[in-house]
Image (spheres, grey):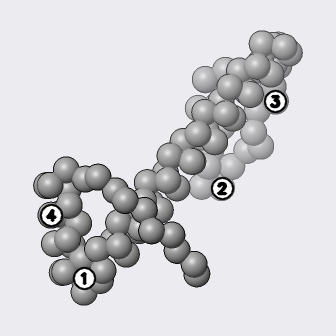
Amino acid sequence: MRTATTALRLEPDLKHRAEALAEAEHRSFSAVVRDALQMYLGKREAEQTEIREAIASWDEYQQTGLHVTGDEMSAWLRTWGTDDESEPPECHL
């Protein structure tokens, strides 16, 4: 994999922590920082996806009025993993 050199300004404590982890794991400082950035970006990208989906769901509800109540959803979820597991509730006005 090709890589690109990037200058990164870090607080001294953060840099020392990354260096200590790299030494403890017998890895390079760059590898530790790269892995940390990959994990951070993955988490934040997933959060952004959830936000977009929530906004789309709200927009759809605003347009259609279709919904499931909290009680209906809770009742359905209580059946999960039981012999009486039920189908999800139907959306309604």
Q: Residue at position x 45%, y 68% from top? A: 5
x then y, percent, for residue 9: 29, 52
Secondary element under disc 4, as helix, strand or loop, is helix
**Label 3 vs 1, first from the N-terminus:** 1
User: Is residue 19 placed above or below 78 in the rendered structure?
Assistant: below
Q: Quadrant of residue 68?
A: top right
**Label 2 vs 3, first from the N-terminus:** 2
x then y, percent, for residue 59: 76, 19
Image side of residue 70 versus residue 34, left or right: right
Q: Residue at position x 52%, y 74% from top? A: 3
Name the front one of labels 3 and 1.
Answer: 1
> Mark 4 Cα within 10 Å, few/some/many (few <14, many 20+)?
few
Q: What residue type is labelled 3?
A: Glu
* Numbered tag placed on residue 83 in the rendering: 2
Alpha carbons under labels 4 and 3: distance apart: 54 Å
Secondary element under disc 3, as helix, strand or loop, is loop
Q: Residue at position x 76%, y 32% from top? A: 89
Q: Mark 3 points at which residue?
A: 90
Q: Name the residue under label 4.
A: 16
Secondary element under disc 2, as helix, strand or loop, is loop
Q: Which residue lies furthest to the right in this view?
A: 64
Secondary element under disc 1, as helix, strand or loop, is loop
Alpha carbons under labels 3 and 1: distance apart: 52 Å
